[in-house]
Image (tube, coloured by chain):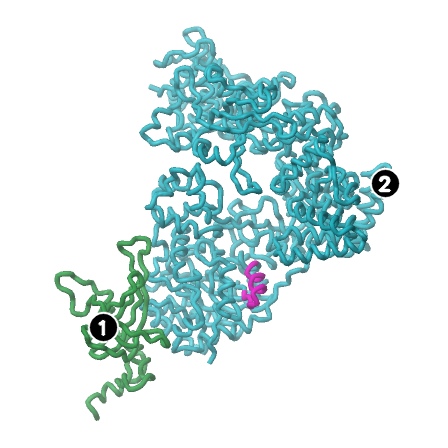
Chain colours: A green, B cyan
Amino acid sequence: MGRNSEIKGFSATRYGQTLDLFESHASRLPVLLELLASPWVMRASEIVCRDASPTPKCVAEDVVVEWDPDRGCPRAFVRAGRRFRIDAVLQSWSSERAWWDPRRHVSRRYWRVLARGGVYDLAFDRTSSTWRLVGIHD
Amino acid sequence: MSTRFVHLHTHSNFSFMDGACPLVELVERAAELEMPALALTDHQGMTGAVRFYRACKDAGIAPIIGCEIVVESAGVLGEETDLPLESRLTVPASVGFGRAAASGFHLTLLARDFAGYRNLCRLLSRTHLRGPEVPSIVALKDLERFSEGLIALSGCANGEAALAIAHARPGRARSALLRLASCFEPGAFFVELVHPLTAEGPRIVGGLVEAADDLGLPVVATNDVHYLRAADHRLHDVLASAGARMALPGPHDRPNAELWFKPATEMRRLFAGCERACDATLEIASMCMGFELPLGRFHFPGAELPSGESAYSVLAKESWRGLESRYRPMPPEALRRLQHELALIDQMGFAEYFLVVKEIVDFARRKGIRCSGRGSAGDSIVSFALGITDADPIEHGLLFERFLNPERRQMPDIDVDFDSARRDEVIDFIYRRFGHEHVAMVATVQTTTARSAVRIAARAFGLPITEVNALSRHLPWVSARKIREVLETYPECRGHPLREPRYAKILEIAERLDRTPTHLGTHLGGFIITRDPVASWTPLQWAAKGVVVSQYDKDDVEALGLVKMDILGLRMHSAISTAVELARARVGQGAVPEPFELPKDDPRVYEMIAAADTVGMFQLESSGQRNLSTRLKPSRFEDIVAQISLFRPGPLEAEMITPFIRRRHGIEPVSVPHEGMREVLADSYGVIVYQEQVLLVAREVAGFSLAEADSLRRAMTKDRSREQMERIRAHFLEKALARGVDAQVAAEVFRQLEGFAAYGFNKAHAACFAVVSYASAWLRTYYPAEFACAILNHEPMGFYTPRLIVNDARRHGIEILAPHVNESAAEHTVVHEGTAIRIGLKDLYAMTGRLVDAITREQAVRPFRDLADFLRRTRAELPAAESLIRVGALDGLGITEAGRPPTRDEMLVLLPELKAVIAREGVAGDDTLCLAPGPTTAVEDPTHVSGWSLARRLSAELEIAGLSLSAHPLDLTAADLVARGVTFARDLRDTLDRTKVRVCGVRERAQTPRTRSGRRTCFLTLEDATGLLDVVVFEDVLDRTGDVIVKHRAYLIDGTLQNNPERGLAIVAEDVSPYVVRSEDGTPVRIRRGVPSGPMGPTPGGPGAPEEESWTEASTRQDLACPRSPRPS
């Protein structure tokens, strides 16, 4: 029995699956499903940032993103001079709010990705055509 | 693996305020994306279905007709509201579903074949027609009953299964899916997956896939499309907000804008883990491939036929019988013509249609309901013989082929006008005769114009209603896409608030809302009559006016080959009938002939028309027609036909009038390029005016048959390319040359045909109208009081306001008597042996039907003696009593301590007190007016029984009756006008051509018709105390003065008089300045009908106030206050 045998022994239902997440493309879907079904994962973009003391999970940094035109999603991003290769896109969603009010207008497309060091939320801001890192999950 | 995709859940803008895809653009986009098929699934209806079907066929795409319905709960027993609160699924309220919103769950239905289409129509009709107030929620048992030929998708995010998954109730989702699937044929139910790129989306999709797999149901991907491109979500948000009467973000408040028409690659990327859902769209499309709407076939309702007879044999017999009564002696040409027409009608299979129309017309005639056919049906001698039309096709040279072209088998269209006051009797007959299940009214699709688009956008942006009004008011009636253009170029829009930068977004949205359907209306008189129940052809619903209406408009109904009959109400028929009744009541039954049967040769009638004294005459009264009357000088019936035809947009644009007039008066010779044209164009002096003449010229010059010639005319009329026109030209020249016509002559003839074919008017239509015109002209000539009274009783009708009709009658020596509680009836009446008109009570402001009945009933008992007597016996409501006092209907009643009747001020002061006494005790003192009047203002005019000045009386009359009864408003300022050097209308005729004149008038109409040059010209019809003034404002002057014309009601106009036989009588304006009508004390007089809000009159600038005030800042409005009555103390 290995170190992760208990985890590996989970059935691939919505309540659990194997941990061999990054060995192949085929293993990504269960990861995605697991993450989606996990209430403990929060979308960083929804976490309220307090200007004085930003929560560790919520950031707002400009990043450079390498785009994969074939798959229509990010391939890697560069943060603070370090390149993060994206291993899996876990989820994607978009947001379009208050277009009639320039002060409140939000128009973004988000990607939650698995990359070195954790789960990251990348956002492409359609109004300014810029990429931002908006969340980091452990 | 396929890379294709078909959108099966698509809302066009026929989802009414919940869809922003224009149909044509939707189909074009699908073709551009190489989609093999496309479904249309609008909310609860199929209004766009037929035009969608045709557009898809044209684009080479397989059309799938469907709709999105609201269905009752399937996953629980009983009602959703029976469940405990925590177990209920809450459906987000949405627009587009009327009362059904938030009351059930969405389900998408698609017609697999024609049986499915008919079931869809039946299902929708049954659901909508349960009752006008009942929400249109489909019952599961109906779904089972009408499921044959239908494919169902389980619904979007508001479907029961998707909602159950969203609420973490997978069990409920499964039972709902099972129950819904059991309603349909095996393999015809799919679980619908929508992935709107929200955080919740994958979870719901996953849950639905899992449920579908457990139940063995197939899944299918859709995108619940509501707009064409991602950026169009703004339009959708605005429409949905306005539709739900909310401010943005509106009822949906969606987190993003992903419900757009995504290409196949996008859709397949969204469902990357579930390709079979995308593949299923192609499977469903192939299941629906065989669907064909049977367009191009005709479906007639059953005519009543004696046994052993066919429709044709009955029609032939009736026609021959009718012909004998129409012609004595019978001209051989009529016999030949009838034979020819009957043969063609038989060949085209339209006999039954004629018989159905005849049945309806016969009913009207039996009941004495005046009616007349109009339009190209007048080209047929069969219509004439059957009594459907009244213009003799032989006498007027009308051609059957213009009505029914054997080369183009189109549904004949016979329009019949009925006396509008009795049209309901005809409609009632139709329902009784054909059965309620076989008759429905035709819908009209109401679309946005500039004003409504601005209102929609402004309301969605949450602006207060006053600001919304300010933005939309004073915009011209143009299409929304032209708003920016008119704001920049139209002088009347100078200073319009919409030009301000802060409204830029509203302006941008409004422009894009151009011609967006907003709701279904009801056609004025179009009825569908079918042999099968109507609901198997078209979905039905209740219209706001309480009738059952088809969801299709007239073009769709025609495309489906259903019989549409226009049962139109013509108020002129009502006015003629009433005038004849009034005249016969005065001079005797036998003394007034039936005006439709008169010989049309009375010189007095033509003199009156030629003098442009035509106010009230059918089709001859407009300013343009009056101008034409003076130029044309009609002297025979054929001239009236020409006059009606010439003053139409087409002939006007083609400038046919000038050569016609010049040739008629011998100013230029009649010339035709080919001798064969001389005879056929003899009536119009060589000018091609009528469409029928195009046919005859083509026959005479190039040897076309009449049917071929009509096809040629239609081809030339439609928008066509240069190449198409060249082909038509070559064909014409070839045939003409073959007949030995000189090439140059043939080319010239074609040039004329090309120039006029698109502009010519249907002579049959004009001839049918001319019969009514002559009848109205004859009545106006011989019974002017009865005629004016009849028109007033049937208003609104015609070109002019009732105020002008009254003024015109007064100018013709007819006395106008103010309404009075002891003298007036409900309607206006003719009194004093035809020399006076007594204004009736029913149109006075604040009058109720009950009060009118009470007054007329009590009149029969004994006259009212005073105000108290009147109030006691009629129990008049306070606002109505106040109106009656202010308009003078109680003048002269009662006696005061001063030994005279009370003034209006005194009565107004007493009124609340008397009402209070009556309410308390039931009786107001004695029968005499004994209560002491309170303090009032001084009597303004002791010579008049009312005590009011003329200005104040006039002001009250305009506000309460909408009429100037005591005098014309400009009579108040006659001295001022003379001092300003104004020429009056009655003197213009004797003023020399090209004289510089100054005139003053109150605006009656302002028109800016289309001109060939594209330049704007405004035709103003003004009225002064002596008559009508026709003013032409050309573009350069309009640029300077357009805002004055729009913002004011009375003007001083400096210009040059045009007074010559060739151009007629008009003033060409050089300057237009506002003129404020003031009473002697300098107070402005309101000259627009107002809505009084009490003894103080309307609020300045508020509803009912004159236009000047709507443009005036609140601070300056006080200056325009009208003469006021004192407030009761």
Reading the image, the residue beneath label 2 is: B331
Q: How many marks?
A: 2
* Residue B281 vs residue B1008, the one in the foreground: B1008
Which residue does the image show at 62% across and 37% down from the upper left?
B420
Above or below, comparing residue B491 to residue B181 in the picture: above
Instruction: From the top left corner, tell me how far across and down residue B963 is, in percent.
Output: 51, 24
Q: How many C-alpha atoms fall within 10 Å of the one at disc 2: few (<14), some, or many (≥20)?
A: few
Extent of the magenta region: B51-64
Amino acid under label 2?
Answer: Pro
SS category of the residue bearing label 1: loop
Is B3 on the left-hand or right-hand side of B990? left
B313 or B305: nearer the viewer: B313
Where residue B866 sits: x, y (%)?
47, 15
Residue B1065 visible to an observer of this rendering: yes
Check residue B53 for magenta coloring: yes
Q: Residue at x 49, y 64 (%)?
A: B29
| Residue at x-position 54% and y-position 18% | B822
Three-letter amino acid code at the position of disc 1:
Trp
Residue pointed to by mark 1 = A40
Labels 1 and 2 touching (C-beta < 8 A):
no
Q: Is residue B20 left or right of residue B659?
A: left
